[in-house]
Image (tube, rainbow, N blue to C red):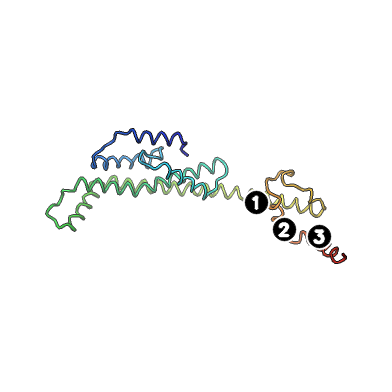
Amino acid sequence: MSTPAQIAANQKNSQLSTGPSSPDGKAKSSLNAVKTGLTGRTVLLPGDDAVAYEAHVAGFFERHQPAGDEERNLVQSLADTGWRLLRIPALEYGIYAVGRLEFAELFPHEEESVRKHLIEAKIFLAYQRQLNNLSIQESRLRRQRDKDTAALRHLQDGRKRKAKAKLDEAARQYIVAVHEERHDLWEPAENGFEFSMEEVEVRALEIDPDLFADWAKENTALENAA
């Protein structure tokens, strides 16, 4: 994830930029993002909203709840890939905006409805390479997203299986402690487990629903005797 210092530097550089000022120049400059915005290492471009990006990344972390550096790196990669994918429609729009400015005076003798379609066709033919590049990069990004998603799922499934196995072991130890009437002294942390007592008890009862049946009978008998 970009650090606050990096984001601030990007914003400062954006403010100091002396890029094109004319409408045509501004539109043409957007085509640079077809290369730098999709394949480059920098995720945030000068015109990007850093706050929106941070919220976008935070949403991915909230959704996937990664644990450990490897999972966090994959979630960050998913967020960045998603950010680049979101950029593609804007880049396509920018290409057509460039074309409409460039070819605004063409086909002056055609009817307006026909002229509009002719200009759109001219834009496609003139910028076919850039539009195709967008399509190629979108496919590449989607493949990267699928690859990272599969890798993250594999890691998290493995982590969950290990956690369940540990919880099962803790529950079994607790069941033994109950049968030996020493469960009041049994604590998860003291036996090398990071679960709460409630988690262990719930899992123990799932494994052995009658775990406390004898205790319940004894309590009922005592109550009746009283």
Q: Residue drawn at (26%, 37%), measured in percent from left and top?
A: 20
Secondary structure under tag 2 reads helix
Do residues under tags 3 and 2 come within 8 Å of each other at their CB atoms? no
Q: Nearer the viewer, mark 1 or mark 3?
A: 3
Q: How many marks are shown on the rendered structure?
A: 3
Q: Which residue is mark 1?
A: 164
- Pointer 2: residues within 10 angstroms few (<14), some, or many (20+)? some
209 above or below 151?
A: below
Q: Where residue 16 appears, x then y in whole percent? A: 33, 33
Q: Where residue 163 appears, x then y in whole percent? A: 64, 49
- Pointer 1: residues within 10 angstroms few (<14), some, or many (20+)? few
Residue type beneath disc 2: Leu
Q: Where residue 211 appears, x then y in whole percent? A: 76, 59
Cα–Cα span, label 3 and label 2: 14 Å
Q: In terms of sequence position, does the residue under pointer 1 or pointer 3 come before the other?
A: 1
Q: Which residue is mark 3?
A: 215
- Pointer 3: residues within 10 angstroms few (<14), some, or many (20+)? few
Cα–Cα span, label 1 and label 3: 27 Å
Image quarter of residue 137: top left
Residue type beneath disc 1: Lys
Residue type beneath disc 3: Trp
Q: Which residue is mark 2?
A: 205
Q: Where residue 62 appears, x then y in whole percent? A: 52, 48
Q: Which residue is at the front of the view, 212 or 18?
A: 18
Q: Residue drawn at (47%, 43%), measured in percent from left and top?
A: 77
Cα–Cα span, label 2 and label 1: 15 Å
Secondary structure under tag 3 reads helix
Q: In terms of sequence position, does the residue under pointer 3 or pointer 2 come before the other?
A: 2
Secondary structure under tag 1 reads helix
| Residue 156 as seen in the image, left or right of residue 80 | right
Considering every residue shown, the one lying at the far bottom of the view is 224
